[in-house]
């Protein structure tokens, strides 16, 4: 690439310079040197100071990278940013991360072919109704599709599948569809975080009913078919961590009901389980904080309770009636997590609580709902950084 043709330059905030092979003011039809989504390119240069960015209208189809020099088709870049449907510092990062121009035409087609219509429909059909509606709103901004029933509050399977099928007829829209999957996850987790923040005064039963898809975010009863209930449950159980899958609620164990059994990578570690015991966000961890600190009755009962569950479960063998009912292999509970209460401003209580967590951490983790909110914020932040 002959970089001498980029005769125009403009230095923006942070003393970062963009180079052009055309007059940017003629392109934008205004007197300033700014243009749509330019700030994301500047943020990219701040993050990657060794790079240089050159803007063109016709030298490359999309973008081209040579050593630390990146040549960007400004029109294609702006079209991509518009398709994302949101403002953000990481648009340029997402644009370059696709590496489209690093593949031959044959390789590009092979990648598209691997994402079949059936696969993508299956992925997105597992979303809750709320997430589907959020996603459809994004799809409408990139595909100029008309929603079949704009007055309908809920989204039916057939309507959602029809929307996806029409989008998937265009390989470029396929790419946008897949790239938006992380944004759908972000929307779901942000909604769940807000729900938890707004319900820290609720009891154990309220939280369990929400996890089970029996109530909406306002506490009103839901009447859904079995398939939609399973989808909603799957969505809401993301609050425990994206790494956990195959959640099983109220697993019978010698007449006792364990709240949630989950696994990490069940294909490779199918016999390793994590047990979640759900207590109320309103429950106290300590009692009589002002005069004498002692564990509350609720958490004092929860600790031996989960240890009892663990011991009983690990004594079961393949073929046990309780396990067979859920099609679970016998195995080991590698971690017990008790979710209870919230943090407070009492420094002494927080110091003792940290010691309590440290002493039990090899086998039992104690999470407060404050911890859960912090974990969700971290997950959301990580997803946004990797868009």
Image (cartoon, helix red, strand yellow):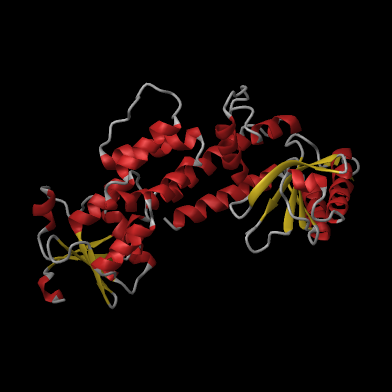
Above or below residue 306? Residue 97 is below
Residue 90 appears anywhere in the view: yes
Residue at 41% of width from left, 39% of height from top?
A: 135
Residue at 12% of width from left, 75% of height from top?
A: 4
Residue 120, image x, y percentages = 41, 48
Residue at 18% of width from left, 54% of height from top?
A: 75
| Nearest to the observer: residue 159 or residue 23 | 159
Residue at 32% of width from left, 30% of height from top?
A: 147
Residue 349, image x, y percentages = 81, 47
Q: Quadrant of the C terminus?
A: bottom left
Q: Quadrant of the N terminus?
A: bottom left
Question: In this rendering, would 34 be left or right of 108?
Answer: left
Question: In this rendering, would 265 be left or right of 93?
Answer: right
Residue 173, image x, y percentages = 30, 49
| Nearest to the observer: residue 78 or residue 290 | 78
| Nearest to the observer: residue 151 or residue 316 | 316
């Amino acid at each position: 690439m002959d970089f001498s043709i980029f005769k125009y330059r403009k230095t923006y905030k942070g003393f970062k310079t963009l180079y052009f092979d055309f007059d940017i003011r003629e392109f934008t039809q205004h007197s300033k040197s700014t243009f749509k989504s330019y700030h994301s390119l500047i943020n990219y240069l701040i993050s990657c100071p060794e790079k240089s960015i050159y803007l063109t209208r016709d030298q490359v189809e999309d973008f081209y990278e040579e050593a630390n020099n990146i040549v960007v088709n400004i029109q294609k870049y702006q079209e991509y940013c518009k398709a994302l449907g949101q403002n953000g510092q990481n648009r340029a990062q997402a644009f370059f991360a696709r590496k489209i121009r690093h593949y031959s035409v044959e390789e590009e087609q092979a990648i598209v072919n691997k994402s079949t219509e059936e696969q993508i429909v299956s992925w997105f059909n597992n979303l809750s109704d709320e997430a589907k509606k959020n996603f459809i709103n994004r799809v409408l901004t990139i595909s100029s599709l008309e929603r079949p029933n704009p007055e309908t509050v809920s989204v039916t399977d057939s309507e959602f599948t029809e929307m996806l099928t029409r989008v998937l007829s265009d390989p470029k829209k396929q790419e946008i569809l897949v790239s938006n999957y992380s944004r759908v996850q972000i929307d779901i987790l942000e909604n769940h975080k807000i729900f938890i923040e707004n319900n820290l005064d609720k009891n154990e039963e309220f939280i369990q009913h929400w996890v089970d898809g029996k109530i909406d975010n306002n506490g009103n009863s839901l009447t859904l078919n079995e398939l939609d209930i399973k989808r909603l449950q799957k969505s809401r159980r993301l609050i425990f961590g994206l790494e956990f899958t195959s959640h099983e609620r109220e697993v019978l164990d010698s007449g006792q009901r364990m709240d949630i059994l989950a696994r990490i990578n069940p294909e490779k570690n199918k016999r390793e389980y994590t047990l979640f015991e759900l207590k109320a966000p309103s429950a106290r961890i300590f009692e009589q904080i002002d005069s004498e600190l002692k564990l509350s009755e609720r958490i004092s009962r929860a600790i031996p309770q989960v240890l009892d569950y663990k011991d009983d479960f690990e004594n079961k063998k393949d073929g046990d009636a309780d396990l067979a009912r859920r099609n679970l292999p016998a195995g080991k509970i590698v971690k017990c997590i008790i979710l209870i209460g919230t943090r407070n401003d009492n420094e002494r209580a927080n110091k003792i609580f940290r010691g309590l967590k440290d002493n039990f951490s090899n086998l039992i983790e104690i999470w407060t709902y404050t911890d859960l909110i912090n974990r969700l914020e971290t997950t959301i932040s990580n997803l946004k950084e990797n868009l």
